Amino acid sequence: MKLEPLQILECPYCGGGLKLESGRFTEMANGEVSTGILLCECCADPIVAGIPYMRTGAAANRAKWDDQLMSLAAHHVLLDLPARYV
C-alpha cells in the first residue's frame, strides 16, 4: 500500500482520518507498506500483503478497543493470531 492514500482515506464508521501504526508490526518494502495496522479514533484495520482490510460486522467489533488495549492483545485480535503468539 502506498502512503499517499492515507491522506484521503477515512474510517467507514466514524469518518475520521486513518494513520499507520508505527511499530514492530509495520513492514515496508520498496517504499510501500506490506504489513501494518491502520488506526483511527474508533477502530483498527490490518494491512496484509499491501492490501488494507476495512473490516465489517463481528470482525470490526472485535478490532475496536480503548487506549488500554493498544498493545499486543489488540494486535493479536486484529491479526487473528492463535493465543500462543500473545
Image (cartoon, helix red, strand yellow):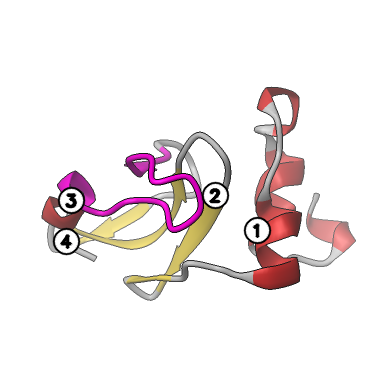
- Tell me, yes or no, whether the two marked residues, 3 and 1, touch with CB atoms within 8 Å: no
Image point (39%, 36%), residue name: 22
What distance separates the C-alpha of mark 3 from that of mark 1? 23 Å
Q: Which residue is mark 3?
A: 8
Amino acid marked by disc 4: Lys
Residue 43 within the segment the image draws in magenta: no
Task: Characterize the local packing of mark 2: few (<14), some (14-19) or many (20 or more) Cα atoms within 10 angstroms.
Answer: many
Image position, residue 70 (x, y; %): 65, 32
- Label 1 SS: helix
User: Which of these two is toward me, 84 or 67?
Assistant: 67
Judged left or right of residue 45, residue 60 is: right
What distance separates the C-alpha of mark 2 from that of mark 3? 16 Å
Judged left or right of residue 1, residue 31 is: left
Q: Which residue is mark 1?
A: 78
User: Which of these two is toward me, 56 or 78?
Assistant: 56
Image point (17%, 57%), residue name: 5
Q: Which residue is mark 2?
A: 44
Can you tell which of label 4 and label 2 is closer to the viewer? 2
Which sits earlier in the primary sequence, circle 2 or circle 1?
A: 2
Image point (79%, 57%), residue name: 85
- Label 4 SS: loop
- Tell me, yes or no, whether the two marked residues, 2 and 3, touch with CB atoms within 8 Å: no
Image position, residue 1 (x, y; %): 24, 66
Which sits earlier in the primary sequence, circle 4 or circle 3?
A: 4
- Tell me, yes or no, whether the two marked residues, 2 and 1, touch with CB atoms within 8 Å: yes
What distance separates the C-alpha of mark 4 from that of mark 3? 12 Å
Residue 80 in sight here: no
Examine the rendered structure and indicate whether residue 46 appears above or below residue 15: below
Which sits earlier in the primary sequence, circle 4 or circle 2?
A: 4
Task: Characterize the local packing of mark 3: few (<14), some (14-19) or many (20 or more) Cα atoms within 10 angstroms.
Answer: few
Residue 45 in sight here: yes
Q: Which residue is mark 4?
A: 2
